[in-house]
Image (cartoon, coloured by chain):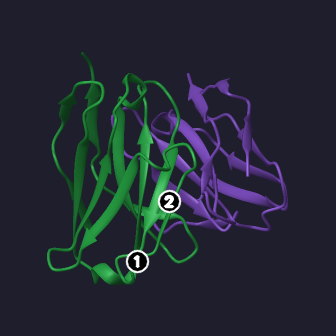
Chain colours: A purple, B green
Amino acid sequence: IQLTQSPSFLSASVGDRVTITCRASQGISSYLAWYQQKPGKAPKLLISAASALQSGVPSRFSGSGSGTEFTLTISSLQPEDFATYYCQQLNSYPLTFGPGTKVEI
Amino acid sequence: QVQLVQSGAEVKKPGASVKVSCKASGYSFTSNGISWVRQAPGQGLEWMGWISPYNGEKSYAQKVQGRVTMTTDTSTSTAYMEVRSLRADDTAVYYCAREERSGYFIYWGQGTLVTVTS
């Protein structure tokens, strides 16, 4: 299952509302996760099952979608949110990641 | 607390092999699968495969099938990944991650940089 993300690069300001889209090449129900990765660090799980916010993740992050189209929304971008975001499908092996969306100032 | 601690950085020549370890603690090792994910410099995340410490069941990505072997040692709660016939494009940070029931990853190792250079 192939995943595409758009945009691949996003320039935004603190306080902006940001939306990242992930599309799957075939239906994956709600078997999708979102990760945040900062340079030199392992990815951090933000959302599982398309919309379930991981414990400890700020509520400004939200996920939605099912089937083939999914979105990650950051309602009000904070300085610590500048990072690269990846979607991952959990529907079937081989597990696959999207190519990433880099969010920069 | 759950921890995954990986072995240190490696420098290898093309054609050589490398074996990376991932020692788990803070949970029952056989309760969750371990996946390996790599990230080439400046690139995205690539899932390499999965192993069940419970029964040894495995699944490998097609791209690395035949060059990668994943194993576990339940006596030491350690997972291993060996990559053979290394090429320059195997240069990457290799992560192990504990796979939750639905296939996502909460806990990750710190990463192991493998550099393949002549």
State the quadrant of the C terminus of chain A.
top right
Q: Is residue B106 left or right of residue A41?
A: right
In which quadrant of the rendered view does residue B75 lie? bottom left
Q: Where is residue B35 in the image (x, y as percent from the top left)?
A: 43, 60
Report if residue A60 is visible in the image. Answer: no
Report if residue B81 is visible in the image. Answer: yes
- Element assignment for label 2: loop
Badge 2: residue crowd in 10 Å (few <14, some 14–19, many ≥20): few
- Give the residue displayed 21% in from the left and 29% down from the top: B12
- Give the residue displayed 50% in from the left and 50% down from the top: B65
Q: Nearer the viewer, residue A101 or A17?
A: A101
- Element assignment for label 1: loop
Q: Nearer the viewer, residue B55 or A96?
A: B55
Instruction: Specify whether disc 1 shares its chain with disc 2.
Output: no
Above-or-below relation of B30 to A34:
below
Residue behind mark 2: A57
The reply to whether the C-beta atoms of the residues labelled 1 and 2 are less than 8 Å apart is no
Mark 1 or 2: the one toward you:
1
Badge 1: residue crowd in 10 Å (few <14, some 14–19, many ≥20): some
- Give the residue displayed 45% in from the left and 52% down from the top: A44
Q: Nearer the viewer, residue B6 or A78?
A: B6
In which quadrant of the rendered view does residue A15 lie? top right
Q: Position of residue B105 (x, y in %)?
A: 47, 62
Give residue B18's mark.
none
Above-or-below relation of B102 to B46:
below
Q: In this view, does A15 lie to the left or right of B25?
A: right
Amino acid identity at mark 1? Asn
Cα gap from disc 1 to disc 2, whole angstroms: 23 Å
Q: Position of residue A83 (x, y in %)?
A: 50, 34
Q: Position of residue B46 (x, y in %)?
A: 52, 43
Residue behind mark 1: B32
- The chain that hosts pointer 2 is A
